Image (cartoon, helix red, strand yellow):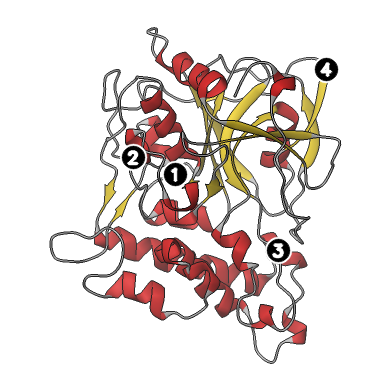
């Protein structure tokens, strides 16, 4: 994104979703990170279930530009499709498949709202890590700010506020893709030719590290078949449980009363399909054959080991920080922030800033 904020072109988008997430709010004007540091946090929800199942902890990552703006990638909770479609696919399939807004540059009000306002998404821990004295982290943030493709968009909840969507070499914006937890599709080596221009928070940071000339991240980012099985089982159970209990996004869902059966198992299958095989459009289906084929069968679609069993290839937030079995240090192939330990994130400066993250 260019530093000249008034120079960004407009990007058209569809109308508002029925999501219950809160997009806009205010925060103290600044945060205690230096330019080029990454924020790493742990929160609740289906992604947390997957991360825990594979023995890791952090669920989100972002990088600070030192000027009141940050880059991260996320999606709001999908809304509901119309009746009777929601009785079989309770979450809006297009919003699940193509998570909005994807990779963005937002101000502190927007980032604070993302972390502390969404219902049912408590932040358990929020840390930051600096890069070495070589300034590699600062080089990453400067590449994102000055060289990545970008497009200004208005908030879907407040048209008078907005943010920048950022993308790959081939596109001015990216979708958030749950499938990236299964297959990062070459992003860590600087390849932006991914399915539907998709990413998640940590794969986009790895992409930026490579594009900034600081090496490609490859620190033990392959997960064996047992972890794929554990992750898919965990996301299914998490979605079904939260839906049945009316927690998180589901506390305002209210669709089951007009269906002839419970819809929480449908929601669980739909989301698990999206993680397992979203590249093939399975976010649109509640047919459990799709995720079970990845979980249980030989030669399923996507990454496989030598025995033909599914594996995952991804850069996780723990990998960005060098935690829980991931390599760490000050030289390639490690993430440039992995040498540092936990530092507590604080919003503690004078003044206030308002912003929206979608």
Are discs 2 and 1 less than 8 Å apart at CB? Answer: yes
Tell me the mark number nearer the camera, choosing from 2 and 3: 3
Tell me, yes or no, whether the two marked residues, 2 and 4, touch with CB atoms within 8 Å. no
**Residue drawn at point x = 33 percent, y = 75 percent:** 293
In this picture, residue 170 sits left or right of residue 75: left
In the image: residue 299, left or right of residue 67: left
Give the residue at mark 4: 351
Residue, disc 2: 324
**CA gap, disc 2 to disc 3?**
34 Å
Cβ atoms at labels 3 and 1 below 8 Å apart:
no
| Residue placed furthest toward the left | 306
Q: Name the residue under label 3.
A: 79
Q: Where is residue 111 in the image (x, y as percent from the top left)?
A: 68, 34
> CA–CA distance between discs 4 and 1?
33 Å
Q: Helix, strand, or loop for circle 3?
A: loop
Residue 295, given in percent of the width and then of the height, sits at 32, 70
* Mark found first going from the N terminus, 4 or 1: 1
Residue 37 appears anywhere in the view = no
Numbered mark located on residue 57 in the image: 1
Q: What element carries label 2?
A: loop
Residue 296, percent across and down? Answer: 28, 74
Could you tell me which quadrant the C terminus lies in? top right
Q: Which residue is drawn at 65% across and 23% down?
A: 69
| SS at mark 4 in the image | loop
Label 3, label 1: how far apart the Cα atoms are: 27 Å
Badge 3 crowding class, 10 Å Cα cut-off, few under 14, some 14 to 19, many 20 or more, is many
Q: Residue furthest top?
A: 133
Q: How crowded is mark 1: few (under 14 residues within 10 Å), some or many (20 or more)?
A: many
């Amino acid at each position: 994104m260019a530093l000249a904020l008034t120079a960004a072109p407009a990007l058209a988008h569809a109308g508002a979703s029925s999501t219950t997430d809160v997009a806009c709010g205010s925060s103290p004007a600044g945060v205690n990170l230096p330019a080029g540091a990454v924020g790493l946090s742990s929160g609740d929800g289906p992604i947390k279930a997957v991360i825990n199942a594979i023995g890791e902890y952090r669920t989100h990552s972002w990088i600070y530009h030192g000027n009141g703006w940050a880059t991260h990638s996320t999606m709001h909770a999908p809304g509901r499709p119309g009746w009777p479609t929601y009785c079989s696919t309770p979450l809006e399939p297009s919003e699940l498949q193509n998570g909005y807004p994807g990779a963005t540059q937002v101000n502190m009000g927007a980032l604070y709202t993302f972390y502390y306002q969404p219902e049912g998404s408590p932040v358990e821990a929020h840390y930051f890590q600096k890069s070495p004295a070589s300034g590699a982290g600062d080089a990453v943030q400067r590449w994102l700010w000055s060289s990545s493709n970008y497009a200004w968009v208005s908030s879907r909840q407040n048209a008078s506020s907005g943010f920048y969507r950022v993308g790959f070499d081939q596109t001015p914006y990216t979708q958030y893709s749950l499938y990236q937890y299964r297959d990062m599709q070459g992003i860590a080596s600087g390849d932006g030719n991914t399915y539907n221009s998709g990413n998640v928070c940590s794969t986009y940071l790895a992409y930026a590290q490579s594009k900034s000339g600081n090496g490609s991240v490859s620190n033990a980012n392959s997960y064996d078949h047992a972890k794929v099985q554990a992750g898919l089982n965990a996301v299914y159970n998490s979605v079904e449980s939260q839906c049945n209990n009316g927690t998180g996004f589901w506390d305002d869902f209210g669709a089951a009363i007009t269906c002839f059966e419970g819809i929480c198992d449908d929601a669980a299958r739909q989301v698990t399909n999206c993680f397992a095989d979203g590249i093939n459009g399975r976010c649109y289906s509640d047919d459990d054959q799709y995720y079970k084929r990845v979980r249980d069968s030989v030669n399923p679609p996507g990454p496989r080991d030598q025995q033909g069993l599914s594996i995952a290839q991804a850069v996780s937030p723990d990998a960005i920080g060098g935690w829980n079995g991931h390599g760490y240090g000050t030289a390639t192939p490690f993430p440039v922030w992995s040498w540092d330990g936990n530092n507590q994130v604080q919003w503690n400066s004078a003044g206030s800033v308002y912003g929206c993250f979608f």
